[in-house]
Image (cartoon, rainbow, N blue to C red):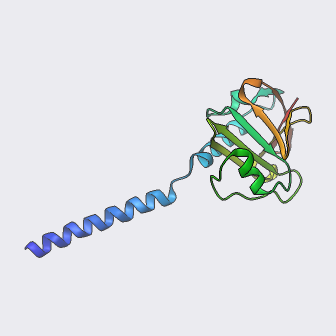
Amino acid sequence: MKYKKTKVIISIMLVSVVCVMLFNFFKKDIWDVNADLLKEEVLSIESSIEEVNLLDITPFDWDKVYFFGPYTPKEWIYETVGYKWDTISETVNEGMNQIVFLKNDQVVCYVYGYPENTGYGISMSENASQIPAGFVLKADEQRPFEVAWDDDVVYLKSK
């Protein structure tokens, strides 16, 4: 009887450990969760809207966002952001998004990929604050973004 009880307890413990490991394995990082939320928000912009403020359409808090240009080495991105937060990819072509939102110097959203694949693109104009590898925008700057549609892709471009 005692052997059977011990076997049941060990089995329950093993199942619990496996469940916790699986939960942590499938759990998304905050920057991925927020990227999904941002995508939903941008894609929900009505076609009649011509201009938005980035603060109004981001469903998370941020105080700074970096827009990195094509072919920016990831070491530059890590150096600019201030730390390595995840394995990131370098853009391999013109027109790709490589955007990092920060809050209190921590990455809270990471957007990467072709607008045609993600359904949206966000870009900064040349008159924005430049950094060696792209542009930076602070949340308190309140810069408007022009909304443009091309087929099923939403493009936001700062004015």
Q: Is residue 143 above or below residue 26?
A: above
Q: Nearer the viewer, residue 79 or 151?
A: 79
From what the image shows, is residue 68 above or below residue 59? below
- The percent position of residue 72, horizontal first and vertical second, equals 83, 54
Q: x, y (%) of residue 118? A: 75, 50
Q: Quadrant of residue 66?
A: top right
Where's residue 157, x and y in %?
85, 35
- In this view, the residue farthest toward the bottom is 3
> Which image quarter holds the C terminus?
top right
**Can residue 49 be seen at all in this image of the molecule?**
no
Residue at the far left in the pictured view: 1
Q: Quadrant of the N terminus?
A: bottom left
Say whether residue 51 is visible. yes
Q: Residue at x 42, y 62 (%)?
A: 21
Question: Relative to 66, is 21 above or below?
Answer: below
Q: Nearer the viewer, residue 152 or 97?
A: 97
Residue 60 lies in what quarter of the image? Answer: top right
